[in-house]
Image (cartoon, rainbow, N blue to C red):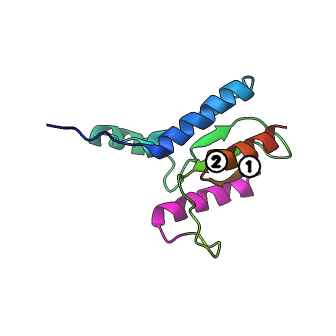
Amino acid sequence: MAYKIRSYPEFELQVQICKYLDLQYPEILYSSDTIGSIRLTGQQAGRNSKIQKKGFKMPDLTIHEPKKGYHALYIELKVETPYKLDGELKKDPHLKGQADSMELLRQKGYWADFRWTFEEAKKVIDWYLN
């Protein structure tokens, strides 16, 4: 019986970006959240829900460095653009929740946005840290 090999493209993008940070900016503090890109068992999901802020969608990557007038940088990683051709956010409740959470972060003085390619994420990181 052949097993299907699962692909986790968003997680792989996250790994690429974290490796880049380790090589290019070894002194900075960052954290990367994998909860959204892995499958939790029922027990794990239940435990996790007890320690998360209700309604807040934590972005995938946080750079814990105050720079350029911001307290920190948050990036929500995607493997494709979350926007329609006209620039409007695609109709998806999860995307809407993520966008709303990033807006709350921006209102509190953080830089926060979606990025969906390594090059785009790298460009923002380099701008922010240099």
Percent from the top left, x then y, of residue 67? 83, 40
From what the image shows, is residue 93 above or below residue 28? below
Q: Which residue is mark 1?
A: 110
Q: Which residue is mark 2?
A: 75
Circle 2 SS class: strand
Q: Is residue 58 left or right of residue 38?
A: right
- How far apart marks 2 and 1 lie (CA) works out to 11 Å
Q: Is residue 126 left or right of residue 87?
A: right
Residue ID at (50%, 56%) = 55
In the image, which residues are magenta?
90-111
* Residue sitting nearer the eye, 98 or 7: 7
From what the image shows, is residue 77 above or below residue 31? below
- Whether residue 17 is visible here, answered yes or no, is yes
Image quarter of the N terminus: top left
From what the image shows, is residue 44 above or below residue 24? below
Q: State the predominant SS element of the stretch in magenta.
A: helix
Q: Amino acid at mark 1?
A: Tyr
Residue ID at (53%, 52%) = 79
